[in-house]
Amino acid sequence: MSDTDGKRHRSFKSGLRKMTGFRRKRLSGLSTSSVISIQGHMAGTTKDEAHLASSGRPASIRSGDGRSVPQALPHKQIYDSIPLVDEQALQRSLDCEEIALIRTQQLEEKRRFLEYQTNLIKDLLAERDRRKAEAQREHQRRLAEQEERIEKAVEALEARQLEDELKQQKDHEAEKRAIQTRLKHMEAYCQTPSPPQSPTNPAFELRASVDSMRSLPERHVTQQHYENLAQAYHIRDNMDGLHASKINVLRGKQKKTLQNFIMKKERELEQMERAHKAELDSIDVEYASQEAEIRQEFLLKRTKLEARWKLQALVEKTKAERSTGLKHEGLPDVIAAEA
């Protein structure tokens, strides 16, 4: 071998030793489960390549532009890449009293945390229900008072309307008596056109002789008098129907007034119902906002607790590994959430 070839051989061996040392350092820094996973992955890859070579199928395919595109990895290689759990290390962690103690403390703290959260939310909802029940009782009280006032107002209105109807009936009776009295006078005037003759006696003759000296106006019944009398008869005959029509008109107006009054009061009751519903909705919105704030605070607290618990578990696992010199597998993280 020439000197040049000897130098090349020595440099190649030196580079190979460096690569081997770097690989040993990488493997020594990994955990046992990672090493097992890497070895399994490498073994699986080698087996798959051998299987592909024996089957005659290419490990890659050609794309349209001539570039080589690797085929998808088999499912076995994906599963082999998942780190395996070291059962012996896990058993050592389960048997470690310090890890078990910190785990018990964390679970107890989780229980208290969830219990406090549940009680606080429960008290908040109970306070909301209490306020809504109180608002409901107050609404029922105001509603009963309003309905009582409306009932009294309706009774008073009906009483006033009845008084108005009785007054109008009295006015009709007085009008009827007046027309009857007028008819009597008109009938007497038309039936006796001249003063009646008195029986003959000395006293009357003496007075007649005295009255004869005076000029008395003579009564003349004209056609107009008879027409007025006929018109009075017509008014008397139609007066009952006219009065009944007026009473009916009055009652119609009173009924319409009463209906409008009742509708107005019903609208007031509906307005009270809408106001009450808006009050209940406001209470729900208020306590829903408070509940959301409380849950957000508990979420932040939960995140801090879980981070602290995870750090505590890691510290205890590290202490156990240092004291025993053996690897310990980490236990599942404690999650501050209800099951």
Image (cartoon, rainbow, N blue to C red):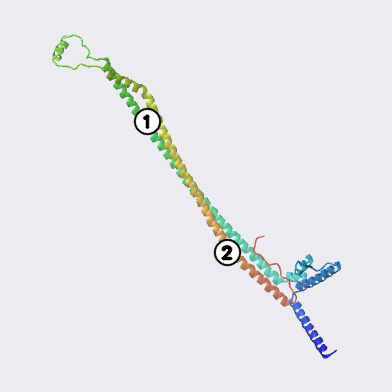
Residue 314 falls in image quadrant: bottom right
The picture places residue 210, in percent across and down from the top left corner, at: 13, 14
Residue 104 falls in image quadrant: bottom right
The picture places residue 219, in percent across and down from the top left corner, at: 22, 16
Look at the image and tell me in which quarter the C terminus lies.
bottom right
The picture places residue 163, in percent across and down from the top left corner, at: 37, 33
In the figure, is residue 126 to the left or right of 240?
right
In the figure, is residue 259 to the left or right of 286?
left
Q: 10 Å neighbourhood of mark 2: few (<14), some, or many (≥20)?
A: few
The picture places residue 124, in percent across and down from the top left corner, at: 56, 57
Q: Nearer the viewer, residue 51 or 160?
A: 51
Q: Identify the residue under disc 2.
A: 297
Which of the numbered marks, if any, corresponds to residue 259? none
Q: Identify the residue under disc 1.
A: 166
Q: Which residue lies most toward the front here?
A: 65
Residue at image x 80%, y 87%? 8
253 up-or-down from 188: above or below: below
Residue at image x 41%, y 34%? 253
In the figure, is residue 305 to the left or right of 270?
right
Q: Which of 15 and 100 is in front in this view?
A: 15
Q: 10 Å neighbourhood of mark 1: few (<14), some, or many (≥20)?
A: few
Look at the image and tell me in which quarter the N terminus lies.
bottom right
Sequence-earlier tag: 2 or 1: 1
Identity of the amino acid at label 2?
Answer: Glu
Residue 151 in sight: no
In the figure, is residue 58 to the left or right of 126?
right
Residue 260 in sight: yes
Residue at image x 56%, y 61%? 293
Residues at discs 2 and 1 in contact (Cβ within 8 Å): no
Determine whether the residue tagged by mark 1 lies in a helix, strand or loop: helix
Identity of the amino acid at label 1?
Answer: Leu
